[in-house]
Every structure is written in C-alpha cells, then in structure tokens.
Image: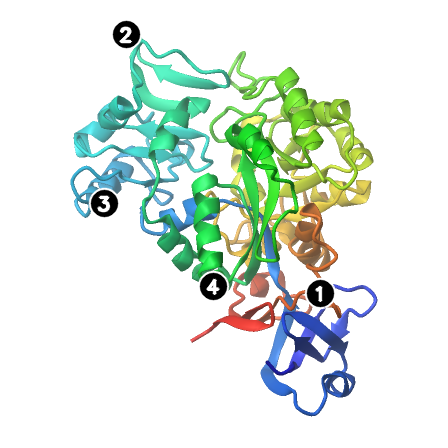
Amino acid sequence: MSIRVYRNAAIHTGDRRNPVAEAMAVDGDRLLAVGGEAEVREAAGRGADLIDLEGAAVLPGLYDAHIHTAQYAQSRGAVDLRGARSLDEALAMVAAHAVRLRPGAWLFGGRWNSNTWDPPAQPDRYALDSVCPDLPVALPSVDGHTVWANSAALRLAGIDASTPDPVGGEIVRDASGGPTGILRETASDRLRDLMVSPDLRDLLRTGQEALLGLGLTSVHDIDGEDCRAAYLALRDAGELKLRVHKAIPMAHLEAAVAEGRRTGQGDDWIRTGPVKIFSDGALGSHTCHMSRPFAGEHGNVGIAVTPYEDLVEMFTRAAGAGIAVATHAIGDRANHLVIDAYEAAGRTPGLRHRIEHAQHLRPADLARMATLGIVASMQPVHCTSDIDLVDSLLAGHDLASYAWRGMLDAGVTLAFGSDAPVEDPNPFAALYAAVTRARPDGTPAGGWQPGQRLSMAEAISAHTLGAAAAAGEQDHKGTLAPGKLADFIAVDTDPYRESPEAVLRTAVLTTVVGGEIRWQQS
C-alpha cells in the first residue's frame, strides 16, 4: 500500500509542540509526517496518494474511556424508556415493544427514570405483568443500578420471598415479604446473567458503525466476557474497525489471573484493560455511598456494594497479577474509601488505577488522587443530566461535584467518556457539557457551578490523550504526531473556533482508523 497524504484541512493535533498542521502523511497504520503541506508531501515522496479533506477540521480520534458497547449495541433494538414521563407511558412503550418479539424472548431495554415521572409512581412487577405477563422483562434504570423485573423474569432467576438480600444489594419487598420486582445493585446480578444476546457479535459489528459515525476510534469497554469473545471473533475475521481496551468483570478476576491476563496485553485492536470493581451505587437510584444521608431520607446513605476490606484485598490481588483496577465510585464516602484502599494496596509500577465516575468527592480528596496517580474517568453529560438530582438530594453537602477543573488543577489525569447507553455516546455532547456545564437548551444560564468548566482544548484532551493515558497508551494514541497510530476524524465544525452550541451540533464527515477510512458520511 502506498503512502497517503491527507491534506486541505485545519488539523488540530493535540501535540503541544506542533498544535496545528495542514497535512499528514500516513505509512501503513502510522503517521509518517505532520505539518505544513509542502514538508509533508516531501516526506511522503512522489508516489503518495493525495486525499483531499475539503477544508474540514481534523482532530485525533476521540476515545471513550467508559462505555458499555454490548449494552449499547443491544439497546439500539430494545425498548427505550428515557422519553417516558409517567408510569403509564412506560408501560405503553413496553406493551408496544412486546408484540414484536417472538414467544419466550427476553424483553430488553429500559433506561427508565422514575425521578421524572408525573404523577410520581413506584414501578413494580405487577405493573409489568399487566402489559407483559408471559415474556420475561428486566429493565435497568437510566443509571443502570436498579432493575425493574416482571414475575416471569423473577421466576427464571429464582428470586422469591425466601431469597436473601446479597451483599451489596437489595431485593425491595412488599408488606408480605415478597419481591416487588425492584432489584438494587448486586440483587440484579442473577437477572443480568440470564440477559445474554445470542447474536452479540452481529450487534457489535453494527454498533461499531454507529460509534465510528460519532467520531470514536477507541473505547474502554466495561461489559462482560461475552463481549470480549465477540470482539476477538470480529478481530480474527478482519471485521473489527474500532480499537478496544477491554475491562475484566470483577466476577472474572480470578479466572483472568489464572489465564495470565495482564493489563495492556494484546495488539493495537484489542488489549486487556483493568478489572472493573463496584464500590457503591448511583445517585439516581439513591444508592451511591455518602457521608451524610440524602435530603429527606433519614438514615439512607446509600449502599457500600463492596466492603472496604474486600476492596483492599482485590486491589492487591489484581495489581500483584499485573492487572490495573477501575473502581466505580460516585458518592463522597465511596470515593474516600476507594482512595484509602488504593493507598493501602500501594502503587505498582506500570499500572494506572482509576476511579470510574468520581462524581462527588470531599474537596481534600482531589489532591490525594493526584498524589497517588489515580485517574479520574468521568462522563461530562452525567453532570448536566443530574443537576436537579444533585440540587435536591445533596443539598447542603460540602462536595466537589463533577469537579473537572479541580481535578486538572490538582494534577489528576482526566479521561472522558459517555457511560453509554446510560447517556448518548456522542462525544460532542460531552465536549459541550464540559465547557458549559449547561443542558443542551442552555440552562442554567452561565452553567451549573461554572467554576468547574473546562476550556475546549482541555475537554478535547480529556477525550483523546487523557483516555489514552488512562489505558497506558499515550505513546501511540491521543495526539497526531509522527510514529503514532493514524487515528483521526474530519468534522464539519472546528471546535477550537466555533461556539460550544455549534460544537454540540457537529457532524462527523470521515473517520480514519489505522490510516484507513473506516466510516464516511454518505
């Protein structure tokens, strides 16, 4: 294959030594030269193929540091309850979706948010049974930490009045002690084990096209071992177009250690990532672990999904086997305990431990994260989705909430992602949220807690180089420089020159991974 020169573009490299360029030469899957067009064409030689980008803005390929790609791929053909504004609307959507399914099929989907329902209502299995009595239904909430199941699903999972609450979870019960169909945190694990799509490889093949079309060239996937197997099959068949840093589920840690898996192991398409561990729940489910009770909920400080002693033991076990750790922590108490546990386990050269979400911290814990080298893997749209929840549930708490500016100023590596399908995987929505701290409609004016806003350059860096650094891949991803992988996108809006509102509406024109055009606007 001949050398290719991509030209006629406003190229923002993310490289501080050479921030803006006119052209790039690609040899194989790597960048050969980046700079002025004349010097790049000279480096490429006379036989180079010229590819005209027609004046587009070019960025390093965007890297989602926290995404559930299997769940996202499944959700594209499942019932989506995010638009439901009442229990009745949600049930009508479920009923309409159920008639399209074959007998015995699971009804997938969810993303319901009872915090926004009017009139207020508590979902239960009886409501689902009224519209779907035969098919098993298990619907995760919008934050993914609560599952709403019908009676058929509970029977298949073996959950009844005699089933005890698991460690780190709650089976919500009615007055007689029977399950209501609401399962919080680890109580839903039995159902999740049953909710496996037989066609996951096909779903991921299609799903990657959607992600490439959004400008994503790499992902940190947080889903299970079935997802890993499907990606390996796609790679071996030459069908994988998206680079995957694949996390290990907590339940599979011992098996992964026995197999000899180590973080960073693999090739440029699929590498082993960190083990994913849960410390607490989520704000929307009122289960994130807080130092003080939620407003109006006496005694409820959330759920410690994994006890502190177990965190230290697992951190030590994983690091000793060469596996980094990514720990879900949302509440300030959870984040404090996770930082304590990382400190107790000690630092391991070559491994980058992370906190996933890191939403609400004690202000003093930002500096501790920096000192210990803990990466903050955060999702900007969570902030703008949660504004009302934070103001109502955490009123009066002394917190650094979604503290992106505070993180950077303290010296914490910041890695941005989406947590799709909890949020939309569109990275330009994340960039908009990071620089405005406002909803897409511009509210609140001036942004929520605007002192934590980032510049556009800082936000893009967190969604490119920061995400690569979280994976230990900063030497060959995240910026456009000679020797690095030729992963980049051409877009119709220059985020360095246009308004955040224009960036929110950005359309991707071309996505290049490994020097090859993998997606192009039709």
Nearer to me, 161 or 223: 223
- Mark 4 lies on residue: 238
Question: Looking at numbered disc 3 in the image, what kind of residue is underneath it?
Answer: His
3 in relation to 106, above or below: below
Answer whether labels 2 and 1 touch (C-beta < 8 Å). Answer: no
Q: CA distance from mark 4 to mark 3?
A: 34 Å
Is residue 250 in sight in this rendering? Answer: yes
Looking at the image, tell me whether mark 4 or mark 3 is earlier in sequence order: 3
- Report helix, strand or loop for mark 2: loop
Quadrant of the frame with the N terminus: bottom right
Q: CA distance from mark 3 to mark 1?
A: 46 Å
Select label 2 or label 1 by which is in front.
1
- Mark 3 lies on residue: 97
- Mark 1 lies on residue: 484
Looking at the image, tell me whether mark 3 or mark 1 is earlier in sequence order: 3
Q: CA distance from mark 2 to mark 1?
A: 62 Å
